[in-house]
Image (spheres, rainbow, N blue to C red):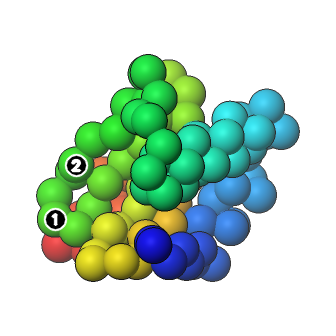
Amino acid sequence: MIKVRFLRSFDESLAYLPERERVKARKAVHRLLDYFQGGPKPIGMGLRKLRSPYWEVRASLACRVVFALERELATFILVGSHDEVRRVLARHA
């Protein structure tokens, strides 16, 4: 069973998105959590390892959800563009 934590940076980045992108990001998180609980991997999920322990899942063509996966804890960090993802990874280098 994976525990889930949402950082303030995730909540804040989600709040700045337009409603349509916000819905897509929430759906991506729910699909990912279902997969973690033993469900099938959704087609087109776009799950990709960035570097340990960071991963991203595609919410839309322009929007990614970044999370850290360590043991039994998934920590959601950010919802943003490719450039925002790179900036977050640079800070956590």
Give coordinates of residue 81: x percent, y percent.
48, 40
**Please, is residue 19 above or below residue 50 in the view?**
above
Residue displayed at 48% across by 43% down: 39
| Secondary element type, mark 1 | loop
Say which of 30 and 6 sits in front. Answer: 30
Residue 36 visible (yes or no): yes
Instruction: Give the position of the C terminus as an image quadrant.
Output: bottom left
Give coordinates of residue 45: x percent, y percent.
44, 30
Say which of 38 and 9 sits in front. Answer: 38
Q: Report how many numbered discs are placed on residues in the image.
A: 2
Q: On residue 16, which mark appears?
A: none
Give coordinates of residue 53: x percent, y percent.
22, 68
Label 1 crowd bin: few (<14), some (14–19), many (20+), radius 10 Å: few
Residue displayed at 67% across by 40% down: 27
Q: Amino acid at mark 2?
A: Lys
Residue 68 located left or right of residue 8? left
Q: On residue 52, which mark appears?
A: 1
Give coordinates of residue 36: x percent, y percent.
44, 55
Say which of 25 and 79 sits in front. Answer: 25
Tag 2 and tag 1, C-beta contact below 8 Å: yes
Instruction: Give the position of the N terminus as an image quadrant.
Output: bottom left
Q: Amino acid at mark 1?
A: Ser
Residue 4 located left or right of residue 17? left
Q: Which residue is mark 2?
A: 49
**Extreme-front residue of the structure:** 38
Residue displayed at 27% across by 62% down: 54
Classify residue 60 by image quadrant.
top right
